[in-house]
């Protein structure tokens, strides 16, 4: 097999697997911070119990995130050495900064969260929860800066075939950083809060730990509802930015083969690259133009505007983008019902809704992954938009066989980690909070 | 010297500092991992050992992640050459680190496969302790490079006398770091064992050191002309004399700090030999990657320096806080 394809599959697989954990961490650390704040304020033992329980789960999620995250820091050198050479002047700094500013912070204070409850004052413990929350969200900033720079590079010039930094702030706050950051963080908050809400729902359904489950459900549902609704605006802002900064990507998302005035918004369809058309297309007329330009007759560039060798493939971006949006709408629907049940104080007794929450847990993960796939595949054939093609970015001296070999190892090892890690988390949940409060050290 | 040159020199040193931080801090938990079956026999002894590194290991590991990131940012060509060139060796380190990262948490929860995860912890600690040195030895003694800065050898060509000796020396240093830490941090029978192991390891450590010196004279004779090599060596000598006495007198804290100082001196020697090279070309010195031809732009190095100067003092501050919170000996029931 071709080395470029293998390297792509390997990065997609390892980054995609890793991307299960950070969003969970983002959401959980936020819920933990809220609960620790309530504990600090009210001194209610119940909050301590809830938080300690969530911290145990966080610890398992976190180590899986660490284990799979190291891989990515190696990957740019292992498989993508030419990428590292061409854009290292800009791309390396955010990775190093993530370590200095965020990863140390997260790791050190997580040590205190997991082992140190009885060793520090309540205030210091709250600060530890805050720093773990802050560190994980800060870590996200640097990773999003690195990723966004690949999407909408800025603050550099090309010199001797290499990208050279000319303005750090412009590179860091490139045209897609802010939109992507808030959109991704919101995805993480939705994920973590739904995990917490699902756990609480499960206890309520099983009629176990009811006193514990009720506040957990209330807190996590509040976060879930607020962020799910906010995500509508955040996602929209990100889409507008994509349409303006990477129009061919938006054309792929919407399967807009030809430039159109009053372009429709695709609801369903099966894009066919060979015929350059979409089968079974259902769309809302003029909606895409309206959403992007606030003008129903605005012209939206189609794929035909771009040279063939610089167009993204359409099928995968189209399908994954639409799955993500569909899930976003599902979360809003679930939130609206949730508000109604909360207002009528019926949420704890609505068996069907609690069951729904439980079964919804996998969906934010699918939304995160499909959103990421849409963004990355939609950028192809570029690895750094209009600067470097993916095919020119791989290590020229690594034989395809080595990449295949390590890919197989990754699949085996990650399968093992998932097969052990997920049951561990499920067992922790089953065991419940009672036994979870241990001082550890 | 131009600003750019100064920055390149600073970054050569700063990356060294990150590696030293890693060797000293993660060094002790790597050492404990590799020596785990020898230090802990009964369940409660193992638990005590794990507890002694529990709140620390994750933060310690960030030193290498940051070191790798800094290498990428400051000297992207060196990062690209080493990580793609030493592909299989780096994969072995990578998979070790993956297993190691999950092993302790999984060991605690996945009781059916407790032994397996313990094994993962041991092997995942042992292999990097050995392979980091082998990789480093190769970079220092030189590897064949082409004019695109890429490595032209293969995995087996990395296994030469000098790199292997450096690998074993590094392993011995990690093991002493781990055993002196265990003697300092854990009480009872584990402490006794740790002291004994550290004492026993001192001899092979000395021999390996001698071997590396001899091989350095053979393969890198120009190293002897560099004054900083001798200064660091003198430093190492002092640290080792005090370490030896501390081990004999069972002064555990002193032994741990001397072991750390010795590790630092080893890096000092290596850095002094290697400077200004990053990856030496064995086929033609003109093809070597140095801090001049492999570095990032002046602006990037400047931005990175600001990041380091702002960030690292804070990191060191709260790392000290962490160690203070969890100070005290862990008793074995």
Image (spheres, rainbow, N blue to C red):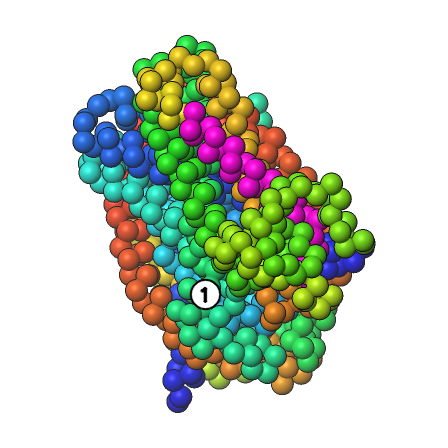
Residue where numbered disc 1 is placed:
A174
State the residue at coordinates (43%, 37%).
A228
Residue B94 highlighted magenta (yes or no): no
In the rendered image of this protein, does residue A173 appear above or below residue B47?
below
Q: Quadrant of the N terminus of chain A?
A: bottom right
State the residue at coordinates (41%, 10%).
A207
Query: Among all residues in the image, which is located at the extreme bottom?
Result: B1
**Dominant SS type (magenta):** helix
The image position of residue A411, as x and y in percent, is: 67, 42
On screen, residue B180 versus residue B156, left or right, reads: left
Magenta region, residue range: A310-337
On screen, residue A206 versus residue A283, left or right, reads: left
The image position of residue A21, as x and y in percent, is: 50, 40
Q: Is residue B167 visible?
A: no
On screen, residue B3 versus residue A285, left or right, reads: left
State the residue at coordinates (45%, 77%).
A166
Query: Among all residues in the image, which is located at the extreme front?
Result: A297
Query: Among all residues in the image, which is located at the extreme top?
Result: A207
The image position of residue A106, as x and y in percent, is: 37, 47
Counting labels gives 1
The residue nearer to you, when weighing A256 against A149, is: A256
The residue nearer to you, when weighing B30 against A64, is: A64
Q: Quadrant of the C terminus of chain A?
A: top left
Considering the numbered disc 1 on the image, is that residue within a helix, a strand or a loop? Answer: loop
In the rendered image of this protein, does residue B71 appear above or below residue B219?
above
The residue nearer to you, when weighing A437 against A355, is: A355
State the residue at coordinates (37%, 36%).
A226
Residue A325 highlighted magenta (yes or no): yes
- Chain bearing tag 1 is A
């Amino acid at each position: 097999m071709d080395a470029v394809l293998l390297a792509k599959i390997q990065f997609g697989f390892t980054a995609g697997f890793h991307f299960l954990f950070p969003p969970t961490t983002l959401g959980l650390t936020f819920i933990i911070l809220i609960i620790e704040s309530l504990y600090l304020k009210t001194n209610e033992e119940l909050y301590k119990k809830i938080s300690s329980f969530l911290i145990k789960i966080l610890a398992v999620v976190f180590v899986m995130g660490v284990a799979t995250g190291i891989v990515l820091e190696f990957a740019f050198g292992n498989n993508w050495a030419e990428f590292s050479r061409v854009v290292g002047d800009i791309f390396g700094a955010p990775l190093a900064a993530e370590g200095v500013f965020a990863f140390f912070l997260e790791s050190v204070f997580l040590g205190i969260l997991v082992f140190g409850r009885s060793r520090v004052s309540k205030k210091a413990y709250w600060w530890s929860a805050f720093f773990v929350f802050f560190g994980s969200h800060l870590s996200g900033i640097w990773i999003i800066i690195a990723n966004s720079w690949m999407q909408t590079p800025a603050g550099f010039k090309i010199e001797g075939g290499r990208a050279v930094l000319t303005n750090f702030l412009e590179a860091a706050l490139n045209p897609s950083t802010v939109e992507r950051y808030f959109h991704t963080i919101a995805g993480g908050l939705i994920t973590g809060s739904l995990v917490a809400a699902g756990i609480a729902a499960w206890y309520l359904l099983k009629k176990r730990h009811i006193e514990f489950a009720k506040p957990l459900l209330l807190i996590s549902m509040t976060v879930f509802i607020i962020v799910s609704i906010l995500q509508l605006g955040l996602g929209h802002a990100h889409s507008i930015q994509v349409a303006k900064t990477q129009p061919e990507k938006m054309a792929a998302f919407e399967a807009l083969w030809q430039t159109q005035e009053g372009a429709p918004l695709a609801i369903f369809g099966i894009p066919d690259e060979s015929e350059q058309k979409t089968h079974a297309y259902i769309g809302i007329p003029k909606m895409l133009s309206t959403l992007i330009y606030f003008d129903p007759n605005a012209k939206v560039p189609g794929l035909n505007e771009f040279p063939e060798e610089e167009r993204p493939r359409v099928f995968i971006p189209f399908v994954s983008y639409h799955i993500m949006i569909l899930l976003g709408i599902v979360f809003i629907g679930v939130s609206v019902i949730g508000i109604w049940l909360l207002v009528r104080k019926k949420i704890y007794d609505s068996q069907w809704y609690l069951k729904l929450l439980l079964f919804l847990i996998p969906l934010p993960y699918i939304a995160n992954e499909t959103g990421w796939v849409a963004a990355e595949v939609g950028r192809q054939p570029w690895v750094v938009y209009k600067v470097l093609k993916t095919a020119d970015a791989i290590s020229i001296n690594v034989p395809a066989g080595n990449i295949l070999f390590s890919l197989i190892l990754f699949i085996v090892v990650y399968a093992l980690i998932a097969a052990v890690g997920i049951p561990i988390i499920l067992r922790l949940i089953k065991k419940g909070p009672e036994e979870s409060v241990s001082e550890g050290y | 010297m131009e600003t750019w040159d100064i920055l390149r020199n600073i970054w050569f040193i700063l990356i060294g500092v990150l590696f030293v931080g890693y060797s000293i801090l993660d060094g002790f938990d790597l050492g404990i991992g590799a020596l785990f079956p020898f230090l802990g026999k009964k369940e409660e002894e193992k638990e005590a050992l794990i507890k002694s590194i529990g709140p620390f290991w994750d933060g310690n590991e960030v030193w290498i992640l940051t070191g790798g990131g800094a290498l990428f940012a400051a000297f992207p060509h060196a990062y690209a050459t080493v990580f793609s060139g030493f592909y299989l060796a780096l994969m072995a380190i990578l998979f070790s680190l993956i297993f190691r990262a999950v092993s302790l948490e999984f060991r605690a929860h996945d009781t059916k496969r407790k032994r397996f995860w313990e094994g993962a912890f041991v092997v995942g600690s042992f292999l990097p302790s050995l392979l980091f040195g082998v990789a480093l030895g190769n970079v220092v003694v030189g590897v064949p490079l082409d004019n695109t800065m890429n490595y032209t050898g293969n995995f087996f060509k990395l296994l030469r006398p000098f790199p292997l000796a450096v690998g074993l020396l590094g392993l011995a240093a990690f093991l002493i770091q781990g055993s002196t830490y265990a003697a300092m941090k854990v009480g009872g029978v584990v402490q006794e064992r740790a002291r004994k192991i550290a004492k026993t390891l001192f001899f092979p450590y000395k021999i390996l050191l001698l071997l590396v010196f001899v091989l350095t004279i053979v393969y890198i004779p120009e190293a002897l002309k560099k004054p900083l090599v001798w200064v660091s060596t003198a430093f190492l000598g002092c640290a080792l004399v005090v370490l030896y006495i501390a081990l004999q007198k069972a002064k555990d804290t002193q032994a741990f700090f001397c072991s750390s100082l010795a590790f630092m001196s080893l890096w000092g020697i290596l850095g002094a030999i290697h400077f200004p090279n990053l990856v030496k070309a064995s086929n033609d010195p003109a093809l070597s990657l140095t801090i001049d031809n492999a570095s990032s732009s002046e602006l990037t190095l400047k931005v990175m320096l600001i990041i380091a100067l702002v960030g690292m003092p804070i990191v060191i501050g709260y790392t000290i806080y962490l160690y203070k919170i969890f100070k005290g000996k862990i008793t074995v029931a």
